[in-house]
Structures are given as C-alpha cells and as structure tokens.
Image (cartoon, grey):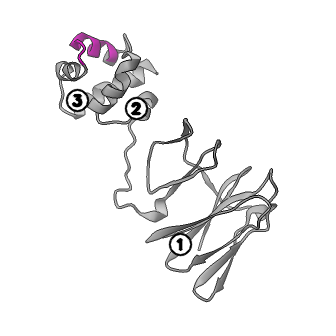
Amino acid sequence: MNRYVTGAMIKKLREGSKMTQSELAQKLSVSDKAVSKWETGKGYPDITLIEPLAKALDISVMELLAGEAVTNRNRSANMVKTKWYVCPVCGNIINSTGEAVVSCCGVALPALEEETPDLSHELMLEPVEDEYYVTLSHPMTKEHYISFLAAVGDNGLQVVKLYPEGSAEARFKCSRIRLLYAYCNRHGLFKRKV
C-alpha cells in the first residue's frame, strides 16, 4: 500500500461519505486515533480491517489497495466506449461499458489498449445478406493466434471466441454495428470502425 495515496484516499472517501474519524473508527471497532494515523500516513490498517474498511467507505478492496477510486463516467452505458480485459492465466474475456476494477484468477487486469490494425491484423469486412463476414489473414497456430473477434454497436455486443488451428473468421448480424475488434494473443487488441 502506498501510505500517502491510501491515507489520502481514506480521508477523501470518509469525508465524501460525511463521516467523522470517530464514526469510521466506530464502524471498524478501532480508535479514532488509528484512523487519524492511517489518513496522515503514520500507520497502516491491519490486514484484517481491509475488507471492512472498504465496505465502510463503499469501495472495492482492489480500489482501496490501488489507492484510487474507479468512477464510471460512462453512466449511459454507451457500448461504443466499451473496454476489454483478457486474463493471461485462463484466457477469460471480460467486457465493460466503462471504468471498472477487474480481476480474474487472482490477477488484476488492466484494460486493453486499442490499436489501429497493421497489415497482419487487418480486419476485412464483407456484407453477406443481413450479416458481416469478418476475416483476418493471420496465423492461427498454438503459439500465435486471434483469440476473439467482436462487433460492437450502440445497442449491443457480439463476441466470437476463436481457437488455435481454427480460422480467423466470424459472422455478425449487421444490426447497427459501429466497431470491430480482434484480439491477437501476441500483439494485443485491434479496432476498426465500420
């Protein structure tokens, strides 16, 4: 824990909840001097208090330990502002419509950074009746492959999980699609506007 950031965080959240040090201390069965020490960086909360402290401050344990609150500014859940997370342990694909604290298999996951496709990750799009047929000319070996393709519209999300030694292709309903994504296990996330 970064004592200054975390202490400042505790104070900010406590004051934001209109709680005094004494009130927070009472919720945690500690002295108000203990809370004061945490907030000034002269001490740390005991490990057994981390979860109750997070609950009292209405924040997740991960946010408390990271020293920053996550506020989703995408209140309208605009699908075009979607964020992607991929677990390096199990390959789980997680999607959010804004800021989030995400973990899987005990690992805190950062949001993937979108890149413009290069020649080896170019997303090719072909309309076929009421669908888009999306392909990539990309190796699909066990060591290097496209893990998933996704289509995002203002009204929803379609994801197709791909596997090594398969083909890098998918079909998506055309309904209001605005963005296409491809995730390469070596080079990251690529985005194309439709």
Q: How many other residues sit within 10 Å of disc 1, few (<14), some (14-19) or many (≥20)?
A: some
Based on the displayed image, in which of its 4 quarters is residue 165 positioned? bottom right
Residue picked out by circle 2: 61
Q: What's under tag 1, amino acid-wise? A: Arg
Residue picked out by circle 1: 178
Q: Which callout, 3 or 1, points at the residue further toward the start of the chain?
A: 3
Left or right, residue 156 beside residue 167? left
Based on the displayed image, in which of its 4 quarters is residue 135 positioned? bottom right
Q: Are the two marked residues, 2 and 3, in contact with CB atoms closer than 8 angstroms?
A: no
Question: In which quadrant is the C terminus drawn?
Answer: bottom right
Q: Is residue 48 magenta?
A: no
Q: What's under tag 2, amino acid-wise? A: Val
Q: Secondary structure at mark 2?
A: helix
Residue at the extreme bottom: 129
Q: Are the two marked residues, 3 and 1, in contact with CB atoms closer than 8 angstroms?
A: no
Which stretch is magenta? 29-38
In this view, the residue in front, 177 or 52, is: 52
Residue picked out by circle 3: 15
Q: How many other residues sit within 10 Å of disc 3, few (<14), some (14-19) or many (≥20)?
A: few
Q: Residue at x 35, y 61 (%)?
A: 76
Q: What's under tag 3, amino acid-wise? A: Glu
Q: Which callout, 2 or 3, points at the residue further toward the start of the chain?
A: 3
Q: CA distance from mark 3 to mark 1?
A: 42 Å
Q: Is residue 30 above or below residue 139?
A: above
